[in-house]
Amino acid sequence: MAKKILTEHINVPGIETFDVYRQHGGYAAVEKALKTMTPDEVVEEAKKSGVRGRGGAGFPMGMKWGFLAKPEGIPRYLVCNADESEPGTFKDHHLMRSIPHLLIEGMIVSSFALGAHKSFIYVRGELLYVVRILEQAIAEATAKGFLGKNILGTGYDLELVVQPGGGAYICGEETALLESLEGKRGNPRNKPPFPAVKGLYQSPTVVNNVESIANMPWIINNGGDAYAAIGIGRSTGTKLISASGHIRKPGVYEIELGVSVDEFLNSDEYCGGVRDGHYLKALVAGGSSVPILPAHLITKTANGEDRLMSYESLSDGGFATGTMLGSGGFIVFDETACIVRNTWNFARFYHHESCGQCSPCREGTGWMEKVLHRIEHGHGSMHDIDLLVDISKKIEGNTICPLGDAAAWPVASAIRHFRDEFVWHITNPQEASRPGAVYMGDLA
Ligand code: NAI
Ligand code: SF4
């Protein structure tokens, strides 16, 4: 059985309440950190753990904390990014609604480490019931002396605010989130300056994902070195994976980083394999923003090695042959899935969610959606395939925030790996546009 850092107690009845959470060792990390450690020592444990940002980018959390500017007399903020909206990603939602005190405890320890006295949890706007759950947990923790003024008599004060999000995917981009938190439209800012220097209200701010922060209680209780001993190479610790699509057991799983993709996909401990009577066609390993992998590259890398659930192994070969661990949104497609239709669906999503600030993203996502629509509906031409590649190249790297890249990569990788399927749509327009029609390749 794999090590469980975040989900060990998640199914205990009543774990959402303060008392049951406390009976299972909850808030011990707050006591240890605030009573026996300095903020710098807490930061040091985060650095030693090697834990990387679990929202998708995988940036080392301790290093990000180390970048936080500390000018005299200026407040610092910790903002938890709980605006989980990446298609195929639902792990933070699961964590917050099931074991909210884990996040609250992580927020207290992390705020203490950063010297923040007012911290925020920005929750996806559609998840209002999760806002209520977190507010209830905060009220309980405050009543027990773990939040508010002079926590546990240590002299440390912390106010925790839960903010419902603006209801747009782009508000999960960290600088758009900060704009939204300030009461403005959620438009991403240019970086640099990074939030660590100029963030919320122009003050130094750390923005961390829910899962990243929820790791901190375990890291404080057991030490950063113990965390770093789990996992593989620079992919330390465990990771929550949201598994969906054509598998026998969809759900949220906590894996030790480094488990093989084959084991994760096929063992009964996790996904249980592709649904009965069907076979694997493609995989999106890290949410809709990452390149898609065809069946022959899912369990083996381009070099023939076992592909592992780790930041390094999934991206083996770069975007030419690999994908990314990203947010851990593991979407499995069997042979009944139409790649063109799916790519069009993703493109439609990004076009709808583009904030419109930069032309390559605003116009390019719309063009990609239109071109994919016409290919899928039997009106495409062979030139359209090159046109899509061209548009995706013009978007990539030329936008303010990563939404542009996120829109471009799935299109470029779908064409790279499934060109035959695009060609089939164009050369067999009547058959391809029939509802439910799927390219069967060699099986046709
Ligand atoms: P990024 O790579 O630009 O930044 C990562 C983090 O490191 C940021 O917090 C940034 O401020 C910090 N950072 C990087 N360089 C720094 C420096 N020199 N000084 C100080 N701080 C620095 O990536 P970003 O834009 O934060 O995230 C993109 C990822 O988000 C994508 O991989 C995508 O998969 C994921 N994503 C996840 C979603 C979800 O629902 N979980 C939704 C949408 C995207
Ligand atoms: Fe807005 Fe797209 Fe530019 Fe991001 S890349 S700032 S979403 S227009």
Image (cartoon, rainbow, N blue to C red):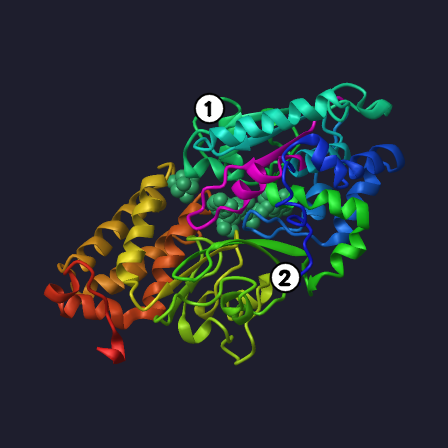
10 Å crowding of disc 2: few (<14), some (14-19), many (20+): many
Q: Is residue 74 visible?
A: no
Q: In front here: 234 or 229?
A: 229
Indicate the position of residue 403 as horizontal and vertical percent values: 43, 46
Q: How far apart are the two marked residues, 1 and 2, measured between alpha carbons? A: 38 Å
Indicate the position of residue 153 as horizontal and vertical percent values: 86, 22
Label 2, secondary structure: give it: loop
Task: Residue type at mark 2: give it.
Answer: Leu
10 Å crowding of disc 1: few (<14), some (14-19), many (20+): few
Residue holding disc 2: 257
Quarter of the image where the N terminus is located: bottom right
Residue holding disc 1: 184
Magenta residue check for 83: yes
Seen at 48% across and 60% down, the residue is: 285
Task: Residue type at mark 1: give it.
Answer: Lys
Q: Is residue 157 above or below residue 46?
A: above
